[in-house]
Image (spheres, rainbow, N blue to C red):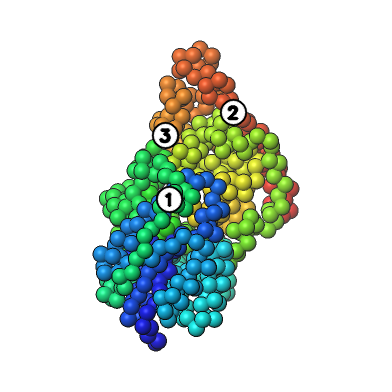
Amino acid sequence: MTEYARALVWFRRDLRDFDHAALYHALKRSHQVVCAFIFDRDILDALPDPADRRVEFIHASVTELQQALQARGGGLVVRHGVARDEIVPLAAELEAEAVFFNHDDDPAALARDTAVEAALRARDIAVHHTKDAVIFEREEVLTAGGTPYSVFTPYKNAWLKRLTPFDLQAYPVEAYADRLEARSTPIPGLWDMGFAPTNLRDMKLPTGMSGGARLFDDFLGRIDRYQDTRDFPAVKGPSYLSVHLRFGTVSIRQLAAAAWQQGGRGAQTWLSELIWRDFYHQILWHRPDVASGHSFKRQYHALPWPNPPGHFKAWSEARTGYPLVDAAMRQLNQSGYMHNRLRMVAASFLTKDLLVDWRRGEKYFADKLIDFDLAANSGGWQWAASVGCDAQPWFRIFNPVTQSERFDAQGHFIRRYLPELTRVAEKFIHAPWTMSAAEQQRAGCVIGRDYPLPIVDHAVQRGQALALFRQASPPALK
């Protein structure tokens, strides 16, 4: 095994100094290791809003990472530029003999990494990249015939069958931390990069490794109740770790190990959610076209979505007249977060009730979600629209009122985000248009003035959605 005098570790969506595959391998094989992070303009310049919570989250997490590496005797070189143009000259400037980084299977990232690797090798600089963001990746879990799984349950069973304690073992970075080189540069400010502070601090979402650790510790204290609480948006049920998983301020191995070892009903349900994440990532690897708007089920790729004028705008602005949908969209617009159950409800409503192309909703979530993950976002939207792998069958359509009655029975979540419905009685909170004129006056909420009338009739739209899919389905399913 080749040893290097100096190596460079390129941090990306792995903003932690512990249990880090690339950092560990670099430290183990090198006498000195320099760490670097690039605020990549290829990504940042394409963002539509200068007040982007993700950039602020990353900025805070990079700041903490630099401080943590300095506490270990190392540092972090931080630059703002096009990553594929920055890494190669940086490695040359440092006289690094090798560059180490972790996999990122987003198609754009793969293209970037391929170009960087070729340029590094042209300068006789070695390149090493490895798995870190998931437990099993790419072609590690395949069917007996050697093909990728397209249905979750068989994939999950194969995933669990393959799992061993070794797969969950942490990389002991600390054993070689004395090889870190104390080299750092100032971190550019948000304004310097063309971005502005957001309401991230007001949201009390903890950032960085310390924030991820606090959320994880809190969740472990209630993980036993996860199965019973996860679908209710007014209840503290989820782990709230999705953004930390997205940017690697927590270790997927640490999270999966805790769930696997705990073994209770809640922990096993949460482990299934982590396996779903692996599932969608391997789908993206095998079918990268799903990341560019192609339906996994090819027969539905050209489905003629009606896209009625004004429907998408009403949905995105929380003006559909269906309280649970509107509350979900206000949560997203105000915080950059949406409860997982509500993501399914909102996506189903846009596609099956409003008959709007799922790609428009996927793009909106991609722009707004602080935890946006290409594989999971594409997979989730295609699931809800019934065009993806192991998707919701097209003939099963969420009723937004029934979903509201079931998962926010007292209307606590609705009232939190729709204060205009605060005084609406519980029996009307899910369908306020059913109030009489007198009841509307008593509630201080006149439908059509203080809160919209329903934009569509669910029963009518359900029939249209069924007809839309029926015409594109194989004859046996019509």
Counting from the top left corner in percent of width and height, residue 371 is at: 45, 51
Q: Residues within 10 Å of mark 3 (few under 14, many from 20)?
A: many
Q: Residue at x 45, y 22 (%)?
A: 424
Element at label 1: loop
- As helix, strand or loop, the secondary structure at mark 3 comes to helix
Q: Which mark is residue 454?
A: 2
| Amino acid tagged 3 | Phe
Residue at image x 53%, y 16%?
A: 436
The residue that mark 3 highlights is: 413
Q: Which residue is mark 1?
A: 190
| Left or right of residue 125: residue 396 | right
Secondary structure under badge 2?
loop
Quarter-of-image position of residue 458: top right
Mark 3 and mark 1 lie on one chain; the one further toward the N terminus is 1
Is residue 91 visible to the viewer in this orientation of the structure? Answer: yes
Q: Nearer the viewer, mark 1 or mark 2?
A: 1
